[in-house]
Amino acid sequence: METTAEGPLVVGIGGTARPGSTTDRALRIALEAARASGARTMCFGGRFIAGLPSYEPQSPIRTPDTRRLLQALRSADGVLVASPGYHGGVSGVVKNALDFLEDLRDDDRPYLDGRAVGCIVTAFGWQACTTTLVSLRTIVHALRGWPTPLGATLNTATGIFDAGGSCTDPKAALQLDLVARQVVQFALAGISRPAPTEPAEV
């Protein structure tokens, strides 16, 4: 999913292999909010990332889908990552997709350096929401990204989406909107640009 309007590029990654999962819905709602804030967007949802091969550090082989994901992230001005909370942590398919960012280690902007990253977690209970958000933020820090001040945590135990995929919980909808807008605001402020090089001492 990509818009043709000008503006910062926000790339969304996340979801589950199950079509129409709550995590996929949350990610797509956040991307809609990013577009409403003036961003272009691309979405790599659950079905896409579930189809990626397992990351193998020693293997140079990259599938066309893997290269497509990496190229999008190279071009991204901001990122939204959405994961379900599985046993207190980030799901395997989301972590696997993020592991491929190791391929960007030698880029001018390595990993997610200098880019705002909005973290979104859906889980069947608040405890899993909290622990998974901490885990996701830690991963973003390791990838040199800037987690947005707000991380969205959506407790799906009571059902927060209707049959059409719309969010029926005002607080959850507000969180998704705020996280997306913070990513766009950081991108528009130029946070994604490389820092100036310090002059060499003589």
Image: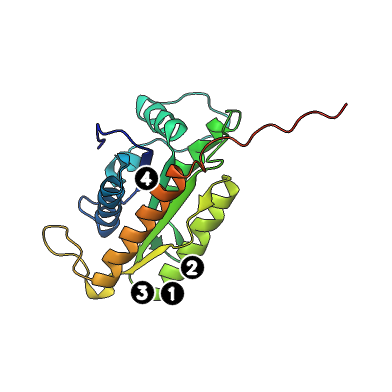
Q: CA distance from mark 3 to mark 4?
A: 22 Å
Above or below, 83 relative to 130: above
Q: Which residue is mark 3?
A: 125
Which quarter of the figure is the C terminus placed in? Answer: top right
Residue located at (22% from left, 69% from top): 160
In this rendering, the answer to whether 71 lies above or below 99 is above
Amino acid type, callout 1: Gln
Residue 151 location (% of width, % of height): 43, 62
Q: Which residue is mark 2?
A: 131
- Contact between labelled residues 1 and 3, with CB atoms less than 8 Å apart: yes
Mark toward the viewer: 1 or 4: 4
13 lies left or right of 148: left
| Mark 2–mark 3 distance (CA, rounded to whole Å) | 11 Å
In contact (CB < 8 Å): disc 2 and disc 1: yes
Three-letter amino acid code of the residue under disc 4: Ile
What's the residue at 46%, 48% (across, down)?
A: 186
Give the residue at mark 4: 13
> CA separation, marks 2 and 1?
6 Å
> Which label's residue is closer to the chain start, 3 or 4?
4
Quadrant location of the N terminus in the rendered image = top left
Relative depth, front residue between 138 and 94: 138
Q: Nearer the viewer, mark 2 or mark 4?
A: 4
Label disc, if present, on residue 144 of the rendered structure: none
99 lies left or right of 76: right
